Image (cartoon, rainbow, N blue to C red):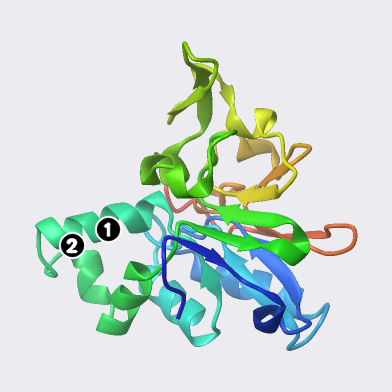
Amino acid sequence: MMEGLHVTIDESTIAGRRVFVFGDVHGCYDELVKLLARADDTAPGNILYISVGDLINRGPMSAQVVSLVRNRDILSVRGNHEENFLKNLTVMSKKMQLAQEFTEEDINFLRNLPYTITIPSSNAIIVHAGIIPGLPLAKQDPYTLTCMRNVVKNESGGYRPYSETDQGVAWASVWPGPEHVYYGHDARRGRDGIQRHEFATGLDTRCVKGGQLSGVFLDGAKEALSVPAKMTYFSG
């Protein structure tokens, strides 16, 4: 089990495996199964899988997705949908429809999701939404990490997070590296597929909205894989 807000995984965890990071699932269980099968074909039994978060909500099979991720020891960061679910679980009750579908083990798994996963050997950081340039991970706000799409310049010359796209610029377009960030959340810009910036790759390709579920290997040529959605599950 991973613990802490920001997790670093070393070579002992990777254990010689290829690392494959995939985009927002949103309960699209069948598509996730197909994407994992495609990736498995490249290196059977020798892949470490990592999700950029938003495993749950909007699609039809959130509980099955979480169960699969837990049982296959897939790592994940926390998305805004996990964050909102857990907040509602705290202030309301486990009588929420989605909460009733999850086991206690599922809920504990979601509670223990970190906001970032750093992989020094791949020079990579995995986050759900984004990271403000020039600010250490420990000082990044959870709202930024789970909800940001754009950054807006502030009076001091730095940036403030912005969840929409009508002000400022895409945070990934000004992320300076040297770490390469793999993120999700920005389905608005994922309409045309994987978003590729010099030091950031956006993996939300709108599966739950009838697009694709996509992922990328972190080694070699950064090979990308995608599977089409079976249907449009959510049109909002």
Vertical arrangement, residue 162 with respect to residue 99, above or below: above
Q: What residue appears at the point 20 percent right and 74 percent down from the top-left corner?
A: 100
The kind of secondary structure element at disc 2 is helix
User: Does the image show residue 203?
Assistant: no
Residue 12 locus on image (x, y percent): 68, 83
Give the distance between the C-alpha atoms of the residues marked 2 and 1, in whole angstroms. 6 Å
Q: What residue appears at the point 36 percent right and 69 percent down from the top-left corner?
A: 110
Q: Residues within 10 Å of mark 1 (few under 14, many from 20)?
A: some
Please tell me in which quadrant of the rendered image residue 177 appears: top right
**Quadrant where the N terminus lies?**
bottom left
- Please give the count of numbered marks on the rendered protein: 2
The three-letter amino acid code for the residue at tag 1 is: Phe
**Which residue is tagged 1?**
85
The three-letter amino acid code for the residue at tag 2 is: Leu
Image check: 192 left or right of 210? right
Image check: 85 left or right of 45? left
Vertical arrangement, residue 120 with respect to residue 179, above or below: below
Question: Tags 2 and 1 in contact by the CB under 8 Å rule?
Answer: yes
Say which of 168 and 99 sits in front.
168
The kind of secondary structure element at disc 1 is helix
Q: What residue appears at the point 67 percent right and 28 percent down from the top-left corner?
A: 174
Q: Residues within 10 Å of mark 2 (few under 14, many from 20)?
A: some
Numbered circle sitting on residue 89: 2
Vertical arrangement, residue 146 with respect to residue 227, above or below: above
**Which residue occupies the extreme right position in the image?**
221
Please tell me in which quadrant of the rendered image residue 225 appears: bottom right
Residue 87 locus on image (x, y percent): 22, 55
Residue 217 locus on image (x, y percent): 77, 64
**Quadrant where the C terminus lies?**
top left
Say which of 218 and 27 sits in front.
218
Say which of 33 and 183 sits in front.
183
